[in-house]
Image (tube, rainbow, N blue to C red):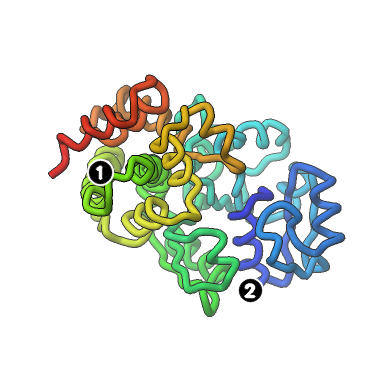
Amino acid sequence: MGGGSWATALAKLLLQNCDSIMWYMRRDDRIADFQRLRHNPTYLSDVEFDTDRIEFSSDINYICEKADTLLMVMPSPYFKQHLAKLNVDISNKYIVSAVKGIVPDENEIISEYMVNYYGVDQRHMLVVSGPCHAEEVALGRLSYLTVGCSDLAHAQAFADCLSGKAMKTIVSTDVVGIEYAAVLKNVYAIAAGIVHGLKNGDNFMAMLASNAVREMERFVNAVDSRDRHICDSVYLGDLLVTSYSRFSRNHNFGSMIGRGLSVKAAKMEMEQIAEGYFGTKCIHEINSGRYQVDMPILDGVYDILYNNVSAVKAIRAMSDTFR
């Protein structure tokens, strides 16, 4: 469910292990172009598909009624907008979230939102995340994804649908931690991009990354304390690749701000959504209202994006807290 680059990469993985899939895309013209060209006309256009094995539809209710498992890969700012058209019961479905963001206004991660608003069984709620850029997955480069679910058997069943020669999978029960880490790593990638744009150097970038992972650990432990290892790939690995890679939209967004563009101008320059822009506000509000965790990097990025504080001033203030 979704037509972007990550949805396209995941669809390619699924078709290596499944006979066929159904694919919800919002626009009929994009579906028609996909079927004619046999590739996504807008994202990862070098990846060819056997479209005879795909049933496309722009009718979200048709897809949700027919499919047993719904893999949601819509951008988080538009998540509610997509589901607003939904009028069929999905409470008995398996829901897999590959949305690396928070539901706007509600300030809930996807698993919470689907359980609270659509009655989905918590044991049927899965999340997929990890240090994987869609572009490298599409190129067949060795990558690792983690599938989380409170029921490890369900996590393994979906992991088997994604696994392949170049895609290794890991299973976990830490749904909440994985989801929040996926949001936070986008915030830290914006900070890393700003640091890169300011030309602060690799030494400082290493300090930012090491402090960011500790900040991430403090927050996810406050939300859901359990025996997790923050250096696992789904936490630290995803943070590092999103912070350093030039494939990272959030890094590139931050880099433009560090080079002197206004936040508004940087948003206009982006061809795709930098989800960290929205995630920063959501996590800041969640932390301020519920947890009050010490998060100087998050607070600094929030000040830059929403309080018009200069990047130089905000980065200097957060650097005073580094250790």
Q: Residue at x 21, y 30 (%)?
A: 317
Q: CA distance from mark 2 to mark 1?
A: 35 Å
- Residue 225 seen in the current view: no
* Secondary structure found at label 1: helix
Q: Name the residue at the top extreme.
A: 307
**Spot occupied by residue 211 in the image (x, y as percentages of width and height):** 22, 46
- Residue shown at 61% from the left, 35% from the top: 78
Q: Which residue is mark 2?
A: 17
Q: Which residue is mark 1?
A: 221
Give whichever of 101, 277 is nearer the camera.
277
Place of residue 200 in the rendered image (x, y in percent of width and height, measured from the top left): 28, 44
Near mark 1 (Cα within 10 A), the count class, few <14, some 14-19 or many ≥20, is some
**Residue drawn 25% across and 38% down?**
222
Report the side of 220 relative to 241 (left or right): left
Q: Answer above or below: position of 215 versus 51.
A: above
The one nearer the camera, 241 or 294, is: 241
Amino acid residing under circle 1? Asn
